[in-house]
Image: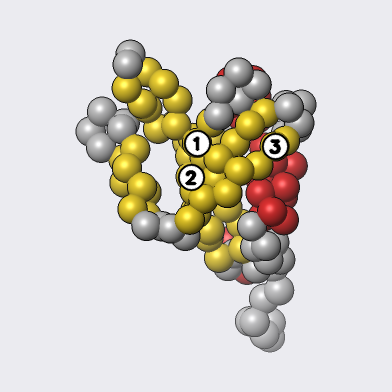
Amino acid sequence: MARLMLYFGGELCIGNEFTPTYIGGRNRPLLVDVDISLAMLKQRIMRALRINSTTNTVNLTCRFRDNGGYCATHVTDDEVCEFMLLEGRTQIIIVYVEVEEILYADVGGPSTEVDM
């Protein structure tokens, strides 16, 4: 199992050296299996935070230790997700959750145009 601490509802700022700062919001611990995909992790996080997955998606950024400090890394694919979750087996990983509204034009959903 991987141990994550979710930060949500605030604002993530990433400095010049990829150092993360989070302003406001809340946090919540979450325990997940290490062998899940990024899509499955996003669904698990949205369920835990009670985010409507039909109208929203989430973008994830995690915080890793780096040369005595911390480095922010965007979780954009299954490889980064797997690395993050493996790290979460030995230490708590901070995950910043940014909610993004799904726009139907972005996902090819129902069109409001009329063909003539």
Instruction: Give coordinates of residue 51: x percent, y percent.
Output: 65, 63
- 82 or 70, nearer to the observer: 70
For the N terminus, the quadrant is top right
Q: Nearer the viewer, residue 110 or 1?
A: 1
Dot 1: element: strand
Are there few (<14), some (14-19), or many (20+) residues within 10 Å of tag 3?
some
Instruction: Give above or below for 88 relative to 106.
Output: above
Q: Nearer the viewer, mark 1 or mark 2?
A: 1
Disc 1: which residue: 94
Kind of residue at badge 2: Tyr
> Is residue 100 depicted above or below 33 in this figure?
below
Say which residue appears at 40% left-offset and 32% top-offset: 72
Q: For the residues marked 2 and 3, what is the alpha-carbon distance in whole angstroms?
A: 15 Å
Q: Are marks 2 and 3 in contact (CB under 8 Å)?
A: no
Sequence-wise, which precedes: disc 1 or disc 3? Answer: 3
Q: Residue at left 64%, top 82%?
A: 112
From the viewer's perspective, tell me whether residue 7 is left or right of residue 30: left
Whole-angstrom CA distance, mark 1 to mark 3, is 12 Å
Q: Is residue 5 left or right of residue 86?
A: left
Question: Dividing the image into 4 quarters, which one contains the C terminus?
Answer: bottom right
**Mark 3, residue position:** 31
Report crowding for label 1: few under 14, some 14 to 19, many 20 or more residues within 10 A (C-alpha). many
Going by the numbered disc 1, the residue's amino acid type is Ile
Residue 60 in sight here? no
The residue that label 2 is drawn on is 96
Under mark 3, the amino acid is: Leu
Q: Earlier in the sequence, mark 2 or mark 3?
A: 3
Quick one: SS at disc 2? strand
